[in-house]
Image (cartoon, rainbow, N blue to C red):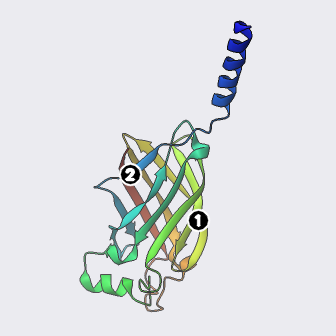
């Protein structure tokens, strides 16, 4: 009888462990992050990054990014360009104060990882793929974005490249 009770308890324990959902590790964005963009002129960075990062290299299905950037933190190195970029002809920070990325899937690649998800900028949502690496508690990646896809054009800068290169480096802590 004791053997049957022990066996039943062991089976129940194994079943409970088998059905427990493994959660991805929660990470906090640490100081020293950078979100830089380069389109020739302008180029610069955003300093207002915040959000939720859940990432586990062994459980990518439970991993996710949900991050925002405060548009008002743009820094091109030129005060007049900063004000212009925040204005109605470009980012329109008053109407669209944040840029957001929410992942829908994270997968392993031969060079690191890819986060597929939605980039929400200037009231336009587009699906993008963000290739990245994760080493020594630092996420690093980059992608290109066509500013015209997000209506980032005041009609006065025909010489400006439509494609912006975005590079991201985000140290994290547990």
Tell me the residue at 52%/52% (across/down). Answer: 131
- Crowd band around label 1 with a 10 angstrom C-alpha radius: few (<14), some (14–19), many (20+): some
Q: Quadrant of residue 31?
A: bottom left
Whichever of labels 1 and 2 marks the residue nearer the N terminus, that label is 2
Tell me the residue at 32%/67% (across/down). Answer: 47
In the shown orientation, is residue 9 left or right of residue 68? right
Q: Is residue 85 visible?
A: yes
* Vertical position of residue 47 compared to residue 14: above or below: below
- Crowd band around label 2 with a 10 angstrom C-alpha radius: few (<14), some (14–19), many (20+): some
Q: Quadrant of residue 19?
A: top right
* Vertical position of residue 58 compared to residue 48: above or below: above
In the shown orientation, is residue 23 left or right of residue 69? right
| Mark 1 vs 2: CB contact within 8 A | no
Q: Secondary structure at mark 2?
A: strand
In the shown orientation, is residue 138 left or right of residue 56? left
- The total of numbered circles placed on residues is 2
The mark found on residue 131 in the picture is: none
Q: Nearer the viewer, residue 30 or 89?
A: 30
Tell me the residue at 45%/70% (across/down). Answer: 164
Q: Is residue 108 visible?
A: no
The mark found on residue 28 in the picture is: 2
Where the N terminus falls, by quadrant?
A: top right
From the top left corner, tell me how far across and down residue 82 is, in percent.
Answer: 31, 81
Q: Secondary structure at mark 1?
A: strand
Q: Nearer the viewer, mark 1 or mark 2?
A: 2
From the top left corner, tell me how far across and down residue 68 is, in percent.
Answer: 45, 66
From the top left corner, tell me how far across and down residue 46 is, in percent.
Answer: 35, 69
Where the C terminus falls, by quadrant?
A: top left
User: Gap in Å between the C-alphas at discs 1 and 2?
Assistant: 21 Å
Q: Nearer the viewer, residue 154 or 169?
A: 169
Q: Which residue is mark 1?
A: 118
Q: Nearer the viewer, residue 32 or 168?
A: 32
């Amino acid at each position: 009888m004791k053997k049957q009770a022990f066996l039943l308890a062991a089976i129940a324990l194994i079943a409970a462990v088998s059905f427990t959902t493994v959660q991805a590790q929660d990470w906090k964005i640490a100081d020293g992050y950078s979100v830089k963009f380069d389109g020739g002129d302008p180029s610069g960075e955003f300093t207002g990054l915040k959000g939720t990062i859940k990432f586990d290299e062994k459980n990518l299905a439970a991993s996710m990014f949900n991050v925002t950037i405060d548009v008002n933190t743009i820094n091109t190195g030129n005060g007049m360009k900063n004000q212009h970029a925040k204005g109605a002809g470009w980012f329109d920070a008053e109407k669209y104060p944040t840029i957001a990325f929410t992942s829908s899937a994270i997968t392993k690649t031969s060079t690191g990882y890819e986060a597929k998800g939605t980039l929400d900028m200037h009231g336009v949502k587009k699906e993008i793929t963000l290739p990245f690496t994760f080493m020594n508690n630092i996420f690093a990646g980059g992608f290109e974005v066509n500013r015209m896809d997000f209506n980032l054009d005041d009609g006065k800068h025909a010489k400006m490249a439509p494609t912006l290169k975005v590079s991201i480096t985000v140290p994290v802590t547990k």
